[in-house]
Image (tube, rainbow, N blue to C red):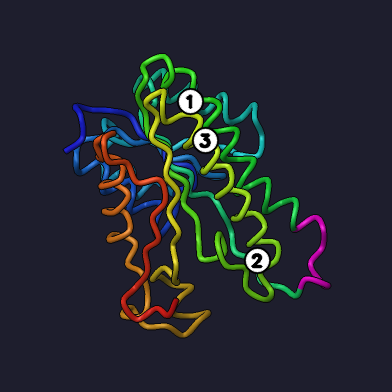
Amino acid sequence: MADNKRTVVVAGVGAGLGDEICKKLVKVGYRVVGLSRSASGNEALAEKLGAHNFFSVSCDLTDVAQVDLAISKVEEKFGMVSVYVHNAAYLHMQAFVDTPPTEFESLWRTVCLGAVHGTQRVLPSMLEKKSGVILFIGATASVKAGADFSAFSSAKFALRGLSQSMARELGPSGIHVAHLVIDGVMWGKRAKESFGMSEGQCLKPASVAKTCEQLIGQDQSAWTHELDIRPAVETF
């Protein structure tokens, strides 16, 4: 069970995993703030979870000034950020020779630079308290770069490297840094319509959110720094 009303920031809220992480953490006692490019799509989530437990902030994570302003709003309303979850990403599939360099830069800025902006903003208070949790949501592409995923994979590899370095640097200061390898397709509209998959072939967002909650609650004598999760039917 979470400590009494600790504050979580989930960067990358939307239908699917981001929303489910927010729901799960509110349920176990956290106050949660969701960051997304547009907060206008999060009204239903806010209504479900209640304004005293959740609110969303519009924020472009690639813009350090916007991130600073967003976290300042969080601190003003809920206090120190105890947990930061970086779930921001988008999928790009294209042959390498046809992938514009701008796409590589855009993905890296969202996946990796956005994580840098967010974590550097919340870390000073965590370090002062000598307590905190940072979760990075990775993908199969974090460890295995498939054909036509060069831009996406390079960004996810970068995020994994960032996580490994931060875990070694910050662990002795009481900050738990963990990276999740989401090995498989998350169940939702895209899985069904774009990939023709069934729910039984996919990861359930609510189940992944439960795993995130378990990582956040780990005792520092037995921290997990990387965890790969996949459906039973996934080949690996």
Name the disc covering residue 30, or none. Answer: none
Quadrant of image for the C terminus = bottom left
- How packed is label 2: few (under 14 Cα within 10 Å), some, or many (20 or more)? some
Is label 2 or label 3 in front?
A: 3
Q: Amino acid at mark 1?
A: Val
In-image side of 166 versus 114 (left or right)? left
Quadrant of image for the N terminus = top left
Q: Real-space Cα distance between discs 1 and 2?
A: 29 Å
In-image side of 230 versus 36 (left or right)? left
Query: Please, what secondary structure does the residue beneath circle 1 have?
Result: helix
Q: Real-space Cα distance between discs 2 and 3?
A: 27 Å
Q: Real-space Cα distance between discs 3 and 1?
A: 13 Å
Name the disc covering residue 166, or none. Answer: 3
Is residue 34 placed above or below 69 in the rendered structure? below
Q: Earlier in the sequence, mark 3 or mark 1?
A: 1
Query: At which x and y percent is residue 191?
Result: 45, 75
Q: Please report the residue visible at 56 percent of the width from the left and 54 percent of the height from the top.
A: 89
Q: Give the residue number, with chain letter if any, for mark 1.
A: 122
Query: At which x and y percent is residue 166?
Result: 52, 35
Q: Earlier in the sequence, mark 1 or mark 2?
A: 2
Query: Please, what secondary structure does the residue beneath circle 2 have?
Result: loop
In-image side of 158 versus 170 (left or right)? right
Q: Please report the residue visible at 55 percent of the width from the left and 27 percent of the height from the top.
A: 120
Name the disc covering residue 92, or none. Answer: 2
Q: Earlier in the sequence, mark 2 or mark 3?
A: 2
The answer to which quarter of the image holds residue 230 is bottom left
Q: Please report the residue visible at 67 percent of the width from the left and 76 percent of the height from the top.
A: 147
Is residue 29 placed above or below 41 in the rendered structure? above
Residue 97 drawn in magenta: yes
Q: Amino acid at mark 3?
A: Met
Is residue 167 placed above or below 95 in the rendered structure? above
Q: Which residues are magenta?
A: 96-103
